[in-house]
């Protein structure tokens, strides 16, 4: 009889823990279901971002006019900086022109590097593919 009482006491003392575990499991299961139903949430390519409505032509004109260091801005202003450096050859004026000249050279270098990669990657543009350079493949004269 004492064995039966001990098992009954054990069941009664374990009951709150069992209920706690069942409650935690049910909360966890419902949280997993919610997570799986929102599987695309958080991935930026699934979310639609609303863009502000503006007149595109006006916005493009303003950004092009006011953005320094673009090729259009450099083309329009390089003469002004050169004239100012020649007319008033102060340290600041000459330095401004030389920095602008350095920027032009860096842009040209980047263009040349990318152009070389494009040429090497396209057999229709690559002259090394078009013209045979080895004596082995040339017919004997």
Image (cartoon, rainbow, N blue to C red):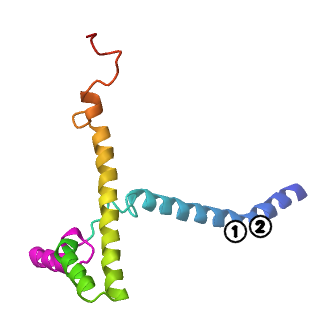
Quadrant, the C terminus: top left
Q: Is residue 2 left or right of residue 9?
A: right
Disc 1: which residue:
16
Q: Using a 10 Å C-alpha cutoff, classify the residue at mark 2 as few (fewer than 14 neighbours), some (14 to 19) or many (20 or more).
A: few
- Answer with the quarter of the image where residue 50 lies: bottom left
Q: Nearer the viewer, residue 36 or 114?
A: 114
Q: Position of residue 65 (x, y in %)?
A: 17, 79
- Answer with the quarter of the image where residue 132 lies: top left
Image height of 129 relative to 87, above or below: above
> Residue 60 in magenta?
yes
Instruction: Please indicate, yes or no, whether residue 21 appears anywhere in the rendered image.
Output: yes
Q: Nearer the viewer, residue 92 or 65?
A: 92
Q: Mark 1–mark 2 contact, CB under 8 Å? A: yes
Q: Nearer the viewer, residue 138 or 73?
A: 138
Q: Position of residue 109 (x, y in %)?
A: 34, 58
Q: Position of residue 125 (x, y in %)?
A: 23, 37
Instruction: Please indicate, yes or no, whether residue 1 appears anywhere in the rendered image.
Output: no
The disc placed on residue 13 is 2
Q: Position of residue 91 (x, y in %)?
A: 37, 87
Q: Nearer the viewer, residue 10 or 141?
A: 141
The stretch of residues the image draws in magenta is: 50-72
Q: Is residue 108 left or right of residue 24?
A: left
* Residue at image coords 39%, 61%: 43
Q: Using a 10 Å C-alpha cutoff, classify the residue at mark 1 as few (fewer than 14 neighbours), some (14 to 19) or many (20 or more).
A: few
Image height of 10 relative to 120, above or below: below
């Amino acid at each position: 009889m004492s064995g039966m009482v001990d098992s009954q006491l054990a069941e009664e003392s374990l009951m709150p823990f069992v209920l706690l575990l069942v409650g935690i499991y049910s909360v966890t299961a419902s949280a997993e279901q919610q997570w799986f139903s929102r599987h695309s949430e958080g991935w930026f390519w699934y979310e639609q971002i609303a863009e502000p409505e503006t007149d595109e032509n006006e916005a493009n004109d303003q950004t092009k006019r006011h953005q320094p260091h673009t090729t259009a801005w450099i083309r329009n202003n390089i003469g002004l900086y050169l004239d100012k450096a020649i007319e008033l050859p102060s340290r600041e004026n000459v330095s401004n022109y030389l920095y602008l000249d350095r920027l032009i050279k860096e842009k040209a270098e980047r263009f040349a590097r990318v152009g070389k990669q494009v040429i090497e990657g396209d057999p229709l543009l690559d002259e090394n593919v078009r013209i045979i350079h080895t004596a082995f493949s040339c017919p004997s004269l």
